[in-house]
Image: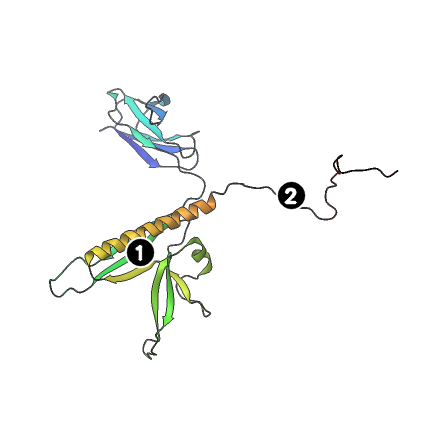
Amino acid sequence: MRKFNIIDPGLGDRLWLQLSGVTGLAEVYMAVDNLAGDCTWVKVLDGVDSGNYVIDNLLEGVWYAFTMVDDSGLADLMLKARPLSTRPYYSVDLLREGSTTHVEGRTIAYRLRVSAINPVNMPAAIFLYERQPFTTYREDEPYRDVFVAVCSPGDLEEYPEGAPPDTEPKFYRLDQVDLDFRSIIAVDEAFQALNNDVKELVYALQALRDLERAELCHVWAGCGPYEYPSSSSSSLSQ
């Protein structure tokens, strides 16, 4: 069976194609994928057999379409892919776990656990906690750890991971949050809210990276550059 796929998205300007099930020798054609549908196909591989091939000199982040022709005809498939950016990007996956059973008259709470996993260029500890003392002293449990929010970029820089500092405020970060709710609806709403907040964090981290020069200032020491007075304000002593 003829097929081809991307075995490595590469970085910057290249992709790795894998051809399999080729009858005789094959030709591979590539085009820049655009919505207008007026793309021009260009032959990038000629007279090749099944195997792995590098397609280079591509534009970073641009989508490309590929198709293949061998001795049995034109392949009835098209592959779309793009080289990954060489610049940093940010992402994280959220793993949801929780209660799945309900016993009428007995189930009084539903548990939601969300874990941040597979982070890319960012920490997994994105959930902000605060260690608070109980208002009434309890010798067996003098404090409680309370989930506050999904971290902001500033929180990631300011607060430690794993345990609170010895000084106030006692904020710290974990890669997991456990919450209890009275209904399944509340669980779903809470997970959606967490998911949205994590998206905002990722977007904020990306925005901080993508800086644009807005102003250029020249700073000097000493007398500085001499400025000649304008003709309208200057006068000569007689």
Residue 35: image location, x then y, percent: 33, 27
In the depicted view, which residue is nearer to us: 81 or 225? 225
Image-quadrant location for residue 1? top left
Residue at (30% x, 24% y) in the render:
68
208 or 121: nearer the eye?
Answer: 208
Left or right of 182: which side holds 227? Answer: right
Mark 1 crowdedness (10 Å alpha carbons): few <14, some 14-19, many ≥20: some
Q: Secondary structure at mark 1?
A: strand
Given the image, on which type of amino acid does mark 1 rest?
Ser
- Ranked by sequence position, the earlier of labels 2 and 1 is 1
Question: Label 2 amino acid?
Answer: His
Residue drawn at x 34%, y 65% is 146
Q: How many marks?
A: 2
Where is residue 131 shown, x and y percent of the image?
38, 68
Among all residues in the image, which is located at the extreme right? 238
Secondary structure under tag 2 reads: loop
**Front of the two marks 2 and 1:** 2
Return the mark for residue 21. Answer: none
- Quadrant of the drawing holding the C terminus: top right
Give the image quarter of residue 185. bottom left
Q: Which residue is mark 1?
A: 115
As measured in the structure, the alpha-carbon distance from the residue carrying label 2 to the one carrying label 1 is 48 Å
Q: Which residue is mark 2?
A: 218
At x 29%, y 56%, the residue is 114
Farthest residue toward the left? 104
Q: Is residue 32 above or below residue 126?
A: above
With 63 as the anchor, is 158 left or right in this view?
right
Q: Is residue 24 above or below residue 3?
A: above
Left or right? Give the position of 157 relative to 82: right
